[in-house]
Image (cartoon, rainbow, N blue to C red):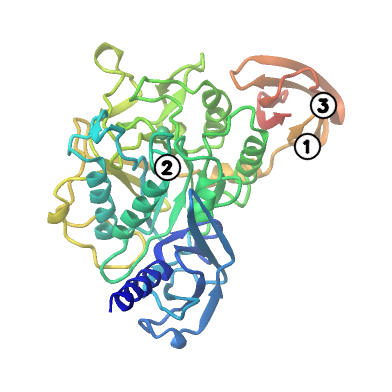
Amino acid sequence: MRVFLCLMVLVISLKLTAATEYYTLAYRNDPATTAVIGWSGDNGTVHYGPVDHATNFTAYPNTHPSDRTGGAHSITRHFARLSGLQPNTIYYFVIRDLNGDVSERLYFRTLSNDVDDPVSFISGGDTRDGFSLFGIYTENCPSGNCLDKRRDGNKLVAKIRPDFIAFTGDFVMNQITSNTQSEWSTWLNDWQMTITDDGRIFPVAFSRGNHEDMFDVHEMFDIPFDEFYALNIHGGLIRLYMLNSELNACSDMSQLNWLTNDFQMHTGTLNDPCWKFVSYHTPTLAIGKDGDLSADQMNCWIPLFEQHKVRLVMESDSHSTKWTYPSIRNNAGNDFIPAQNPHEGVVYIGEGQWGAPHRDIYYTGSNAKDFVQDAGTFDNFFFVRVTKDTTTIRCVKFENVNGVFNNIEDNLGGGLPSNIVLWNPQNGDQIILTKPIDVTGIEEMVTLKSQVFPTIISDECTVQFNEKVQSVDIEIYNSLGKLTTSTVVQNQESTIIKLNGLSAGVYYLIVKYENGSAESHTVVIE
Ligand SMILES: [Fe+2]
């Protein structure tokens, strides 16, 4: 009898570990037609289709085996990269594992490919637990357990039903003193709280924080291998850049070259999105923690953002909260100042309080920054709703979670549910951005009178004019706005500019015509 019971326990435990679990949905390509279903446990096949057949897997018209098995920290992850999906369509799916066991039925909605459709998403990060020594927290988790607040945030995701989530990194502690496998398992288990009672699972654009090892996010969720990428939301409504702030902003040329090229392909061309947003982990100028400035990001990313009319940047890491006025880099390149023309500036939001230990605001009183509209310390994430004309940003506090009603609609671009608790600091409970990229400006820019190639330069580049120019000045400025070289071109259709004496980085090549007009080209020197 005892042997029989032992066998029974063994069979049951084998059954438990063999089943699929820890479901995630990630973006690595076009959100209108693709999605990556991730899971742990046994390998298997996804059965899916636009009609709900509950767990009757044979009734679904499509099957897709896992394309890749990855994982990290002794956690196995399987990924099925679905493609060829219909935009703005609900797909139901189950995963049938190798033993024939079928998962619960889940469903998701693809994004649209129509810029006229609104979209709503959650931006947030820093879900890690507080550091504890012998079970005693040495960091400030006011609720007594940071994971309780992370779970509150996850439950709010299910109640809000966003179209997707832009996650800004720092999932778990992942340090020598912590049990990383256990932490990741708990994180993945907690993430299941974001799934609604009726089985809707939300896609995530994941990015990497400083608590992740290189490739952790790729291995856990199947984001692209480099861990930086851009997503085309609603066929050109938003170009969303997910950057990797663990790669040096100036010296990692793979990310910088890609970013420069991608911005150029989406500025002044027919590919221009209505909005460009950027999401990454480490703030360029942290309002919390030690108020650190990332000089490399300030020098090599921010000028690109400003030139290419990025309007919203989402940051994390400091475990405090801010939203700023539309802002620009100051002349010295060591601070931000409010933009004179708000349409020229970038709004920065962050900085990562999805449950992580609380930290105080660094810049307060007479040291408070003029460009920061409001700052505070509390558990939260941001809710961003975007149309062609307007971006509305609100900050959801992790309070009264059980009292928040459930949104029940699955339409794209939904609003917040009743009873949600919003941050309502002295300057109001929302930020509204208007005027996306000016269409008339696009038409003007399409008819540029000069072109530069290549834009990623090892020693020289060519400036080609549409017609022979009488006399133009060509000036090259570095990312700090300092003139590094200039030349005059007369009676030519093209000229070669030697740049081999300049150090690597982002530069601006300005062509000044006799009539006073000027054109700007961004180039990167390797
Ligand atoms: Fe961090």
Seen in the image, is 63 located left or right of residue 409? right
**What residue is drawn where x is 28% and y is 71%?**
198
Question: Which numbered marker is on residue 168?
Answer: 2
Q: Position of residue 442 (x, y in %)?
A: 58, 45
**Which one is earlier in the sequence, the residue at label 1 or at label 2?**
2
Question: Outermost residue toward the top?
Answer: 366
| Residue 372: quarter of image | top left
Image height of 102 relative to 342, above or below: below
The CA distance from mark 1 to mark 2 is: 33 Å
Are discs 1 and 2 less than 8 Å apart at CB? Answer: no
In this rendering, does residue 414 appear at all? Answer: no
Mark 3 residue element: loop
Query: Which dot, 3 or 2, sits closer to the camera?
Result: 2
Foreground residue among 107 and 341: 107
- Label 3 sits on residue: 459
Mark 2 nearby-residue class (10 Å; few <14, some 14–19, many ≥20): many
Task: Please give the count of numbered marks on the rendered protein.
Answer: 3
**Which one is earlier in the sequence, the residue at label 3 or at label 1?**
1
- Label 1 sits on residue: 454
In this rendering, does residue 301 appear at all? Answer: yes
Q: Quadrant of the C terminus?
A: top right
